[in-house]
Amino acid sequence: MRLTKKDIERANQRRKYSDGRGLFLSVSKNGRKSWAFCYTMNGKAREMGLGSVDFMTIDQARDRAVQLRLMVKAGADPMEDRDRARAAIVRAKASGTSFRDVAESLIKKMKSGWSKNGKSEASWRGSFENHVYPVLGDRDVTRIDRYAVRDALLPIWHKVPVTAKRLIPRIEEVFDHAILEGWLVGENPAERRMIRKMLPPEKKEQKHQKALPYSKMQPFMKKLREYRISSPNELAPQALEFCILTCVRTGDVIGATWDEIDLEAKLWSIPISRMKAGRQKPTDRDHIVPLSDQAIAILKAVVREEGNPYVFPSPRNAGEGISNMTMLDFLKDKMGLAGEATVHGFRSSFRDWASEETDHDSNAAEMALAHTIPNKVEAAYRRGSLLEKRKALMQDWADYCEMEITSPNDGELA
């Protein structure tokens, strides 16, 4: 029996009400009513939405159902025909719309939600300009498939794996944006799970950070300290020297806030939430860093920015800390160690010095670096902070770095 207008008005249960010959009134969970045409094509049942009852009368729905039944009878699939029509509209709209156009549109849309320092925008633009635009930039978004996306990532997959892995979700977002804006129809060709399956396995070999031999630390630190004293308002040399003296990671220094530091007790408490990702365990505690006299002197010399909680405030963005490239750029450009050493590498310099030149407890040295302990017996021994031993160790390290060269050839910098 065919539906009447009263039947349509009274329909309030979440179900389909048949009008006959494939036409149904569909009521959703929230009570919305729409028309649907159900048919079978190649042995598979299919359902095609026709529109809301608010915009299509029952007579219009029946007329449309008649047209669709004729298509099915002729062997044509109504849903495929609809998708082809939509795709034609999309292609017309997307004519001349390149991957670069869509990416720049997305960046503009997301920009307002990014941090004021512009790091996110710079990161997105830099990765696209260097690795994606040269391959996909000028191609029409409707003519890029998953193989093209894979081919764009292959050259950098093992060469710069961190950037490559960061690009996968970014490219996926670009195509999501193209679909939402009507520039693309169908599935996202950069769906990340599929793309990861198409790429080779990741290399497991460990890449060690380049480190300055500890025998060269004294002339290096003398040069660094002279630069810091001659440029009291420049944060890079202050932050770098503080990082070296405390043997922490770059992220620990740039994220350091004044409420973490006790100048009187000469201690720095780094919250476990800011420690290296993936290393935290429920039983972990904040990492306590003993501060040498030299480290305290640096902190007292730092010019504080009113209202800024960071120890090393950004010179460009009020209320924020320095960027993660500040110390590395200074090390390469001002200290002339490009390709010879990294900021992280000074942790290795410290560890080699402690092992080869001192009688300090190796456990204390490992704890100074906030390393995990593989051996259960050793881990039990090290549950205590070994704080007093570490205080002596860090002061000896600072004194060693400050020591004057005794021989003209000792520790000579290249």
Image: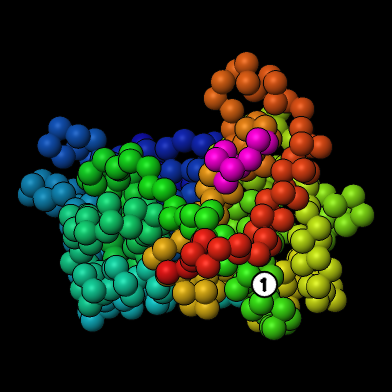
32 w.r.t. 258: above or below: above
Residue closest to the far top? 377
- Location of the N terminus by quadrant is top left
Q: Position of residue 171 (x, y in %)?
A: 35, 61
Which percent across, then down, holds residue 54? 48, 60
Residue at position x 57%, y 60% in the image: 217
Q: What predominant SS class does the magenta segment belong to?
A: helix
Taking the spot 15% from the left edge, 32% from the top edge, the residue there is 43
In the rendered view, would you say 194 is above or below 281?
below
The secondary structure type at the circle numbered 1 is helix
Horizontal side, residue 211 vs residue 198: left or right: right
Residue bearing mark 1: 225
Residue displayed at 51% across by 61% down: 411
Left or right of 182 on screen, residue 241: right
Look at 60% across and 64% down and name the residue there: 405
Would residue 153 appear left or right of 367 to someone viewing this image? left
Is residue 186 in view from this perspective? no
Q: Mark 1 packing: few (<14 Cα in 10 Å), some, or many (20+)? A: some
Front residue of this view, candidates 190 and 371: 371
Please tell me how many numbered marks the rendered image carries. 1
Is 205 inside the magenta-drawn segment?
A: no
Quadrant housing residue 258? bottom right
The amino acid on which the numbered mark 1 sits, given as a three-letter code, is Arg
Which segment did they paint magenta? Answer: 353-360
As rendered, which of 256 and 170 lies closer to the eye? Answer: 256
Residue 53 in percent (x, y) is at 45, 56
- 132 vs 39, nearest the viewer: 132
